[in-house]
Amino acid sequence: MANIQVHLHAKDISSLSGQTLVVFTKPGSAKDSAAKITHAETSKALSTALEDKILTGASSEVLSFREARFLGFRNVISVGLGAEAKLNHEVVRQAAASLCKEAKAMKTTEIFVHLDGITGNKSHLAEYTQAFVEGLQLCSYNFDELKTNDKKKVDGLQVHLITKLAKDKNIQAAFNEGTILATCTNFAKRLGDMPGNLMTPTILANEAIAAAKGTSLKVSAWDLKRIEKEKMGGLLGVARGSAEEPRFIVMEYKGAAASKKPIAFVGKGLTFDTGGISIKPSGKMEEMKYDMCGGAAVIGTMLAISQLKLKINVVAFVPATENMPGSRATKPGDVHTARNGKTFEVNNTDAEGRLILADALAYASEQKPQLIIDTATLTGAMVVALGNVHTGYFTRNASFKNKIEKAAQQSGELVWNMPLTDQHVKDMKGTFADLSNTSSAAGAGSSTAAAFLEQFVDADIPWAHFDIAGTGWACGNRLNYCSPKGATGVMVRTFVEIAKQYA
Ligand code: BES
Ligand code: MG
Ligand code: ZN
């Protein structure tokens, strides 16, 4: 999957030898030269490129100098970081991804990175070390396990990060955290990239159970009988049309005293969404294998929290099913009863995510957590509103909103607060049941979907809903550490940051 190994060394790079040296560049001042090479000695080796102004130090500018034969290295790669004033962890993350792509294109198998060149500031170096590892590991993800012909054994890329601070506890912790976050994000991506026939509700549950082996996570999956017993009418109503049994995945992590209230995550695990009887058009329907990316993000988050050994208690719930138009499928107009006793009419069977989340949110509320976070590829309207740039989130809790904004700034994932008001709630009133799963008003489809979800969350529990319909996959056009067509694993990094605030 990720054919890369990253190591951290406390050495002087000038004393090392190997295949490829990596140095950083920043734009220079007009009077000395076009660019500044942060490893001063290397300026000599790249002097022609500097004179010719090929090197500019622009952010993510990557130039390789093959057979440069400088110091003990055969090749040199220069990686631009852009202007000092604009340097931040996202710039570093993207620079690392650009480097990873170049190293692969060059077919070099061993690179030595002059990490100290990024910044001389010790506390920034920790932050940037984490971002650099994330960029490398995220970019190295490759979903090729279903291809038989181009599986030529390529040697993995060995990356050596060289810094005189490699023994520093903060640098080591940052390195470790970056590795865990990226690995768990890549884990979520793989679940999303698997096609529907190979990622059924049962397989998704088994993957979560298998991944938790040997960790302190407790994972179980309820089968159809248990889900019936638990009166999850939303999940059952959606699953009716499919020959595949649904699953309700339950994950538990205990990192604090039993008396401490847990935080709860809920993720939409819709392993394939045909739309059901309100069937979707066939164009691009194959993309609906990604409709379980909310569930995948929650599973990835739980794995990361357990590996980071955060001192909190966490529970997570992933309702998993297919949405198929089988002969027993829910029909438009059918009325079902959710776990909390509320009835809803299904006026469009394609608005199914909110129905399976309804039961999961009601169940999560019963656990009396400190807060509930859910995430889902919930609405096409979200894609229209924000594209694949920001994840839209909804919450009516002001202090929770601040925590979310702070977490997203830490993680580098972009989020945008969306409106959720009593007006939206009114739009979801049913004609023949308590609620309708479609809005009686035109527009604001993401807000009305959120308003439906809100009806299943205990009013005393702070709650936020993240709609990743736009950001869950195919973000390669703007994030070079994401594959152009594949799943992104979005929200794992931010959710871990939120969780850390409760530790
Ligand atoms: N899984 C889709 C939402 C979706 C659409 C995600 C496009 C990613 C890209 C969801 O189940 C759905 O079909 N929602 C409907 C709701 C509508 C019928 C009220 C939608 O958004 O069209
Ligand atoms: Mg749908
Ligand atoms: Zn869906």
Image (spheres, grey):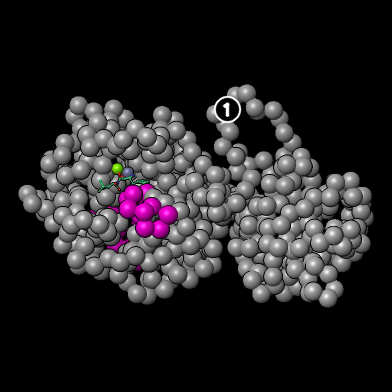
Who's the residue at 15% across and 62% down the image? 426
Who's the residue at 71% across and 52% down the image? 99
Q: Left or right: 153 with respect to 381?
A: right
Q: Left or right: 280 with respect to 163?
A: left
- Determine the residue located farthest toward the top in the rendered image: 149
Residue type highlighted by circle 1: Lys
Foreground pick, 170 / 405: 405
Foreground pick, 457 / 444: 444
Who's the residue at 87% across and 67% down the image? 40
Picture coordinates of residue 328, whole percent (x, y): 18, 29
Who's the residue at 71% across and 63% down the image? 58
Stretch in magenta: 360-387
Would you name the residue on which mark 1 appears?
147
Ligand 2 shows up in which quadrant of the image?
Answer: top left
Q: Quadrant of residue 382?
A: bottom left
Picture coordinates of residue 258, whole percent (x, y): 39, 62
